[in-house]
Image: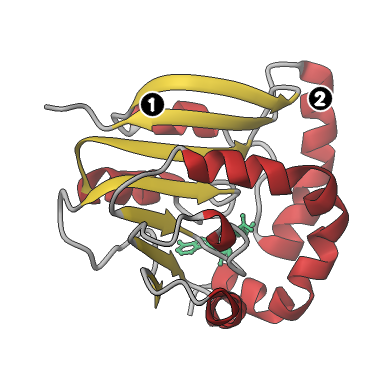
Amino acid sequence: MQKTARKYSRIAGLYDLFEWPIERLFFHRLRKEAVQHSYGKTLELGVGTGKNLPFYPPDQSVTAIDFSPGMLKRARARLQALGHSEIELEEMDAQALSLEDNSFDSSLSTFVFCTIPQPELGLSELYRVLKPGARAVFLEHQRSGNPLVNLLLNMMDPFMRLLLGTSMVRDTQHNIEAAGFEIERVEFKTLDVVRLIIARKPER
Ligand SMILES: C[S@@+](CC[C@H](N)C(=O)[O-])C[C@H]1O[C@@H](n2cnc3c(N)ncnc32)[C@H](O)[C@@H]1O
């Protein structure tokens, strides 16, 4: 198992508790908003403990993957409580998806591309499995355009890498564009650090 997957499995039991304050204040409503941009046959990458699952409409078909068995165990418990029969959870590495080319209408990732060990690989896999014209929704934190904010993010970075394998200073929007996605809309949610990015795989 990958080092990052092991880290997440180790902290899975405390993960929701650890994030509770920021979740209540802030992330909860952002998740709801992000999920609303997904549609049709949807792929969720890095589902974690399944915090986005309650927001999917009951008839939306969702394949949600994560490479951490510990996080998936929590997501399974959440899914069982929800009783949403159109959601499937699978243990899978986003950098090597065992999914068919051009097979999803939309995708969602929330706070995942800061953590995927090789984000470029994850984005190229995502691009491969989305249909031409499909929508890719990202709710992610990333480096800022403001040097002072970046100073703070750089200070937090070693701690977050050690704890969760999470980078505070990746340029995720740039990575998304570099993978070939067309950016349709970017909304800054906390300064320019937390961003809702709506992108599309070009038609051809
Ligand atoms: C910061 S957590 C976010 C979880 C969830 N998306 C949320 O918003 O609460 C990052 C998640 O991405 C998963 N992850 C990171 N890299 C991955 C990869 N290569 N393949 C699958 N899952 C991955 C981790 O196991 C973890 O559950």
Q: In which quadrant of the rendered view does residue 124 lie?
A: top left
Of 60 and 66, nearer the camera is 60
For the view shown, which residue lies furthest in the left direction? 204
For the view shown, which residue lies furthest in the right direction? 21
In the image, is residue 20 above or below residue 185?
Answer: below
The response on whether ligand 1 sits within 8 Å of label 1 is: no
> What residue lies at 36% left-to-right and 56% top-to-bottom?
43
The label shown at residue 149 is 2
Of 116 and 70, nearer the camera is 70
Decide: few, some or many residues near mark 2? Use Cα within 10 Å; few <14, some 14-19, many ≥20.
Answer: some
Disc 1 target residue: 177
Residue 172, position in %: x, y?
52, 34
In the image, is residue 88 above or below residue 19?
Answer: below
Of 1 and 91, nearer the camera is 91
Decide: few, some or many residues near mark 1? Use Cα within 10 Å; few <14, some 14-19, many ≥20.
Answer: some
Q: Alpha carbon of mark 1 to alpha carbon of mark 2: how far? A: 23 Å
Regarding mark 2 in the picture, which secondary structure is present there? helix
> What residue lies at 48% left-to-right and 55% top-to-bottom?
56
User: Is 154 on the left-hand or right-hand side of 82?
Assistant: right
Residue 204, position in %: x, y?
11, 27
Q: In which quadrant of the rendered view does residue 37 lie?
A: top left
> What residue lies at 40% left-to-right and 22% top-to-bottom?
183
Give, as a three-letter code, the residue at label 1: Glu
In the image, is residue 60 above or below residue 123?
Answer: below
Residue 4, position in %: x, y?
58, 68
Give, as a three-letter code, the residue at label 2: Val
